[in-house]
Image (spheres, rainbow, N blue to C red):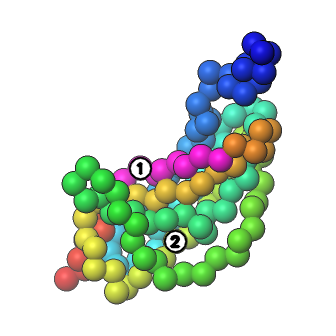
Amino acid sequence: MTISACSLTGSDESPGDGIEFRVEAESSAPGDSVLIQMHNRTESTNYGINLCLSTLERRAGVRWVAVDQGRACFLALYGLPAGDTAGFRAYLPDTLSSRGTHRFTTTVERQRDNRRFDVSTNTFVIESDD
């Protein structure tokens, strides 16, 4: 019984340990593009990712609300080996009406145990280009 419990819980590592997910913008405007990057800072863990499936979210008080980006993505999982970085250029719709603080969130799969978890970027501001 003890062995089973240990194998289920794994190490004390949290699922996102070693993953850095960033957006390379402090502010943007509707119609702009932003570069989102994920860096696997681990020495031995491989992850499955698809940055195209990242969700743009807007801060609404203490909650985060998904923003429709109106894009299509391939439903493929790409490998992110230990030490590698992947990037994706996300285009902000020019019809975007939700100004304010935003971030991207995506799902990552740790391949050694097929465990999935969400990670979020740093925040950035979408402002009117008026």
Of residues 104 and 61, the one nearer the viewer is 61
Give the distance between the C-alpha atoms of the residues marked 1 and 2, in whole angstroms. Answer: 15 Å
Please, is residue 85 above or below residue 74 in the view? above
Task: Tell me which corner region of the image, top left, top right, bottom left or bottom right, holds residue 28.
Answer: bottom left
Q: Is residue 46 visible?
A: no
Which residues fall within the magenta stretch? 116-124
Q: Earlier in the sequence, mark 1 or mark 2?
A: 2
Where residue 116 appears, as percent x and y from the top left, is 65, 47
Q: Quadrant of the N terminus?
A: top right
Three-letter amino acid code at the position of disc 1: Asn
| 118 inside magenta stretch | yes
Tell me the SS state at disc 2.
Answer: strand
Tell me the residue that label 2 is attached to.
Answer: 90
Task: Tell me which corner region of the image, top left, top right, bottom left or bottom right, holds residue 99.
Answer: bottom left
Tell me the residue that label 1 is attached to.
Answer: 122
Task: Tell me which corner region of the image, top left, top right, bottom left or bottom right, holds residue 7.
Answer: top right
Three-letter amino acid code at the position of disc 2: Ala
Name the residue located 75 percent from the left edge and 61 percent from the top edge. 77
Please, is residue 20 above or below residue 58 in the view? above
Where residue 10 appears, as percent x and y from the top left, is 71, 25
Are the residues flagged by discs 1 and 2 in contact, CB closer than 8 Å?
A: no
Q: Is residue 95 left or right of residue 89?
A: left
